[in-house]
Image: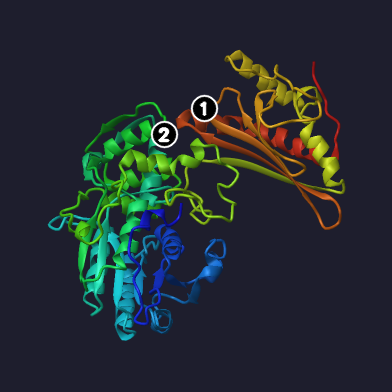
């Protein structure tokens, strides 16, 4: 749960003895939103600096922080954000800017460092990128290193934490790894798959970020932070497949694949934006292994030790494995682990999850609608396209599944755990929610969910949602192969539930 990973760390104080005021930039980014949660759980006062306040309203901590709206390139707004701040977290980057992102990052860092000095900030904490000191760096890593240098030369003591691949659902590097491994059982890859990497779990990154606030020495230096293992990118993919329950991947490195070709390939296979993918791939030519572990002198490892790679992957995949789909994107509460996706993460983050959502309004009362929801399936059928469900049942029986032959225990009432054709009742909350988990033969996991909400006019809003989590390439192909049927099955089903349309059964 939130705060557990930093429970043994000290709390930095302001001059008056109150908890230090921490400014967090990059709050809508992957690390920023999670860091704010940890700082609040640890007892800090938090101020957020953001360009668009409206983008923060979905975060559960929105009403627990002070928010300053402004642009990182505007000296006036940066000075306002840093007024009376004790600790400033610098988490800004411009990787999604297509052209000349390095100049943008340089200007932001110079403006921020100058304002931090003018406002008497006691410490800047910056999360940068780990890289070999003597190697020719990619544009991304070179800009990260230059940003750290600018902040350290600002006159404000700066702790720069340099991380490599961060493992957690929503991290761009992790999502690229996830999608490549899930979708490609056989991969012809560039030679960078043999470059050594020291991945780190996001929970450990957050521990270092929070812990850096209470270091007593006025440090002005960089530290490498990494997890307990050094692996090649090929080993990361193989171990991810194992942790995700996928078959072993066949990976064939070829030296002729350039970073440009690789990024185009990644853009086709994954939903990670191609501009971001290209800059991440350019950086994979550089070895990212911690050159020293001196950070441990100031922030000791947690009692259980740093998180191994496969454990970090398992944490990131927990919600899918537990079939906790109800709160995947829409729940207003925070996930229990920083490795899990937040509702505000990018649409391409959080793993592959396909949905088909249909909404229908009716003048019928919620109790009338609920009777139809609870009696669905079995001899009652599903919709005017019940024939399509019957066809799917025959297909399931042909490959050894249960098909529709199980029917229903009772024609009108359901209880938790009931078998219903090739579904099982996973959750039922009368008269608002029915969730069915698929037990037909599938290359993935699937659910069918109905929600009923009363409207102000006395009618009912029906929300029908089909959810599918694919497993491997076959899982993705399956979704797209049945997608044309969705246009027949799902609209008629939600109309039947809302309006009691006549069901046609085929014997």
**Camera-nearest residue between 431 and 493:** 431
Q: Is residue 87 above or below residue 292?
A: below
Residue shown at 19% from the left, 59% from the top: 297
Q: Is residue 417 left or right of residue 128?
A: right
Quick check: 86 left or right of 52? left
Q: Is residue 20 above or below residue 489?
A: below
Q: Nearest the camera: 375 or 506?
A: 375
Among the 4 quarters of the image, the one containing residue 247:
top left
In the displayed structure, 274 sits above or below 423; it is below
Q: Around disc 2, counting alpha carbons within 10 Å, would you say few (fewer than 14), some (14 to 19), or many (20 or more)?
A: many
Choose top left, top right, bottom left or bottom right for residue 298: bottom left
Coloration of the structure image: rainbow
Residue 96 position within the rendered picture, expressed as x and y whole percent measured from the top left: 40, 60
Which residue is rendered at x = 41% and y = 43% of the image?
315
Q: Quadrant of the C terminus?
A: top right
Q: Residue at x 30, y 59 (%)?
A: 208
* Numbered badge on residue 99: none
On screen, residue 349 versus residue 367, left or right, reads: left
Q: Secondary structure at mark 1?
A: loop
For disc 1, the marked residue is 443
x and y, in percent, of residue 268 in the image: 42, 42
The answer to whether residue 139 shows anywhere in this view is no
Provide the secondary structure element on which disc 2 rests. loop
Give how far across and how far down residue 486 sits, in percent: 67, 35
From the viewer's side, name the closer residue of 358 and 325.
325
Between discs 1 and 2, the one toward the N terminus: 2
Q: Determine which residue is flagged by label 2.
A: 244
Pointer 1 local density, CA inside 10 Å: few below 14, some 14–19, many at least 20: some
Residue 402, picture quadrant:
top right
Q: Is residue 257 visible?
A: yes
Q: Position of residue 277 (x, y in %)?
A: 36, 50
């Amino acid at each position: 749960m939130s705060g557990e990973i930093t429970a043994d760390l000290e709390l930095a104080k302001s001059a008056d003895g109150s908890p230090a005021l921490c400014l967090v930039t990059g709050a809508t980014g992957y690390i920023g939103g999670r860091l704010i949660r940890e700082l609040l759980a640890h007892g800090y006062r938090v101020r957020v600096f953001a360009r668009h306040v409206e983008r923060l309203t979905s975060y559960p901590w929105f009403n627990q922080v002070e928010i300053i709206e402004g642009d990182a390139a505007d000296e006036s707004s940066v000075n306002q954000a840093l007024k009376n701040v004790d600790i400033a977290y610098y988490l800004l980057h411009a990787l999604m800017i297509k052209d000349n992102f390095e100049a943008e990052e340089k200007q932001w860092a110079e403006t921020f460092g100058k304002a931090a000095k003018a406002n008497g900030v006691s410490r800047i904490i910056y999360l940068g990128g780990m890289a070999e000191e003597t190697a020719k760096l990619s544009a991304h890593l070179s800009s990260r290193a230059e940003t750290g240098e600018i902040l350290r030369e600002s006159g404000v003591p700066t702790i720069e934490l340099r991380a490599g691949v961060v493992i957690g659902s929503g991290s761009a590097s992790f999502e690229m790894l996830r999608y490549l491994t899930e979708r490609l059982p056989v991969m012809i890859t560039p030679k960078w798959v043999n470059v050594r990497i020291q991945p780190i779990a996001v929970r450990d990154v957050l521990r270092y970020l929070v812990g850096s606030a209470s270091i007593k020495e006025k440090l002005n230096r960089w530290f490498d932070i990494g997890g307990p293992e050094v692996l090649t990118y090929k080993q990361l993919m193989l171990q991810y497949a194992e942790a995700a329950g996928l078959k072993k991947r066949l990976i064939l490195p070829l030296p002729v694949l350039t970073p440009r070709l690789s990024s185009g390939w990644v853009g086709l296979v994954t939903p990670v934006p191609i501009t971001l993918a290209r800059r991440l791939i350019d950086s994979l030519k550089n070895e990212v292994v911690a050159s020293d572990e001196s950070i441990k002198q100031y922030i000791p490892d947690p009692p259980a030790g740093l998180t191994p790679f496969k454990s970090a992957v398992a944490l990131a995949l927990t919600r899918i494995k537990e079939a906790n789909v109800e709160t995947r994107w829409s729940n207003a509460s925070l996930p229990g682990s920083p490795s899990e996706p937040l509702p505000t993460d990018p649409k391409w983050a959080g793993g592959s999850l396909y949905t088909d959502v249909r909404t229908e309004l009716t003048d019928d009362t919620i109790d009338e609608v609920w009777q139809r929801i609870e009696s669905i399936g079995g001899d009652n059928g599903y919709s005017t396209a019940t024939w399509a469900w019957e066809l799917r049942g025959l297909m399931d029986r042909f490959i050894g599944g249960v098909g529709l032959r199980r029917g229903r225990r009772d024609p009108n009432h359901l209880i938790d755990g009931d078998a219903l054709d090739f579904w099982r009742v996973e959750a039922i909350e009368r008269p608002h929610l029915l969730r069915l988990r698929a037990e037909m033969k599938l290359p993935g996991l699937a659910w069918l969910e109905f929600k009923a909400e009363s409207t102000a006019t006395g009618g009912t809003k029906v929300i029908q949602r089909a959810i599918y989590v694919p497993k491997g390439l076959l899982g993705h192909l399956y979704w797209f192969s049945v997608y044309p049927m969705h246009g027949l099955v799902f609209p008629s089903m939600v109309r039947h539930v809302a309006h009691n349309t006549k069901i046609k059964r085929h014997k």
